[in-house]
Image (spheres, helix red, strand yellow):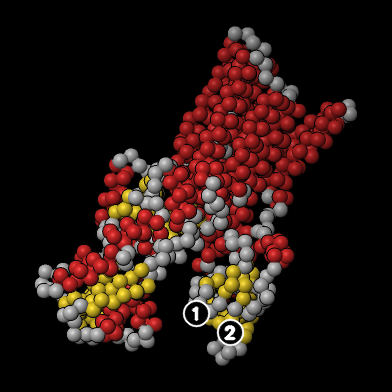
Amino acid sequence: MPTTTADAPLIRRAQRPRRTPAFSLPEVRWAVAATALFAAGLVAQIAGAPAWMYWALYLACYVTGGWEPAWAGIQALREKTLDVDLLMIVAAIGAAAIGQVLDGALLIVIFATSGALEALATRRTEDSVKGLLDLAPTQATRVTAGGDEERIETSLLSVGDEIIVRPGERIGADGTVLDGASDVDQASITGEPLPVAKTAGDEVFAGTHNGSGAVRVRVARNPSETVIARIVTMVEEASATKAKTQLFIEKIEQRYSVGVVVATLALFFIPLTVGAALQPTLLRAMTFMIVASPCAVVLATMPPILSAIANAGRHGVLVKSAVVMEQLGAATVVAFDKTGTLTEGTPVLTEIRVLPASHLDENDILSFAASAELPSQHPLGRAIAAAARQREIALRHAVDFHSVAGAGVSALVGDHRVAVSSPPRTDHTQNPLSIEVTTAVSELESIGRTAVVVTVDDIAVAVFGLDDRLRTDAHTAVTALTALTGRAPTMLTGDNERAATQLAATIAITDVRAGLLPQDKVDAVRELEQGGHHVLLVGDGVNDAPAMAAAGTSLAMGRAGSDLALDTADAVVLRDELSAIPAVVALSRRARRVVVANLVIAATFISALVLWDLIGTLPLPLAVAGHEGSTIIVALNGLRLLRDAAWSSGVHQKTNVVTRL
């Protein structure tokens, strides 16, 4: 019996990632200790305790809350860099030196609390993705060669192993169902709200929850290569990079920090030379150092970007770097490949037009073509081989296999040289039946088929017609992207113009560039870029990789994509859902808006507090609260992008199209 709706909350709770307890973070423990010591010192001071007692408590607060940033600042000085954390510690010590130990301790407490919140924010971002690993079970039931069952660690599973998944268990590996049937809750991977029926031939994922049926699954990926593991790995790699805005901020941070130190020294020494009192002068200088420090500016960029990367990863889009997350939203035109991208990439052979000159029958021609295509990874080649298997036609061993991206394949099958190629690249100058070839190709293309020509020993013997299915969410994605960028996407395909145009018309794409070789796609991308556009290229094949490298940003289809395309792309749509593309573009734009808002917040607080200190008298506690408060506001503002609502809200606002996965 399928999993009922009533069961769903239980499953969701079981699948919710576990977050790291706050007190497991050293920053939190030190902040709590510093706060407790500050509170004890304040109570002692108010109660009239001896000065040495509350001074001792305040100084203990200094040590517990300030030793870590102080040590980090000293280490930075050894590398000839100035850490802004060190400025806070120096300001606190300066306050204590003039008898303002309470104000200095308050600075330490708020500074330590801010650091703890930053650590919690960072850990929450990591947990939101790493927590997916907890979904995968640690053990699975493997079927041995002799048919027995054994419980083993899932980390020991290998490709080709067979496992038994019983009702209520979690699936231990990515694989294909061999036999049995069940309903599988895939919400943790695909976001689908209802369980999905799985039977023989269907794909299942590690960590998903099996329903009431038992299934036998053949492992298709090693444990380190499962969907969940790839999400974690790629998001970790992306988190290790820095956005261009962050790099710019870090570039000016050192100069700015040195400027703050120089200005602080000037505010201290210049008034003293004209007879100002020591204590108020030092207090004003220390206050200036606090409010002018760029802590909030430093935190303005990376928390929003990393939160956006983690959110996209949870929804099946793996963004490879912070730079990419920042650039995705800059796209002004999206260029789609056709086969395997806008379509499912699983075409089927629908027609075989045997040419008059052929001495072979239809089955013989299909046998030759399928044998030549057998080593190919191209969807059209797989469709031809699948058609031969469906007809139970015996395939032959092919040698001397050659594949030219965008052109076709050739191989030696028995004693015959067989080629399966696209019509524009087939040389028929020596073939007296080129009119028949052209006619067959034109007829097939006129009804939206993709035509390929089969030659045996340089003689054209047949024209195959293949058809592909449009992805169900293609029209929704194109509509949303048109609204986001203000321009309908472009189609770049190696397919024939008639088939491409016919498909494009169904999804409101008007700019169609067909019959393109890989270099032609590169030229098309460069033409768009030279026209002032930032191109986001979406593709899946080997022939898309050069254009991906040339585009401003690129996305690869994770399931259908070739290894080269996946390596070249800046981001990967893991579940091949086109609706994720406008969602991640909108998320990137929202992240950029949050970064700008954070920079405005930080600059406003710094400017206002600095002017107050220079023109009037800014109390040190208020300076501390204002400076650290702006840092906390900026950090929490960036964390808003971790919410599921941030994934789809940008698209909803522009198109009213549901894009949430």
Where residue 393 sits: x, y (%)?
34, 86
- Would you say 340 lies left or right of 583 here? left
Residue 352, located in which quarter of the rendered image? bottom left
Extreme residue toward the top, this view:
274
Q: Residue at x 40, y 56 (%)?
A: 506
Q: Is residue 447 above or below residue 258?
A: below
Is residue 89 toward the left or the right of residue 358 in the image?
right
Q: Which secondary structure lies at badge 2?
A: strand
For label 1, the crowd category at 10 Å Cα-Cα, with few meaning under 14, some 14 to 19 and many 20 or more, is few
> Can you identify the residue that label 2 sits on?
143
Residue placed under numbered mark 1 in the picture: 160
In the image shown, does 315 or 334 lie closer to the viewer?
334
Where does residue 499 sit, x and y in percent of width and height? 31, 62
> Looking at numbered disc 2 in the image, what kind of residue is underneath it?
Val
Would you place residue 53 above or below residue 418 in this image? above
Task: Report how far apart the C-alphas of labels 2 and 1 lie in the structure.
Answer: 11 Å
Image quadrant in which you'd find residue 19 = bottom right
For label 2, the crowd category at 10 Å Cα-Cα, with few meaning under 14, some 14 to 19 and many 20 or more, is some
Q: Residue at x 62, y 76 (%)?
A: 182
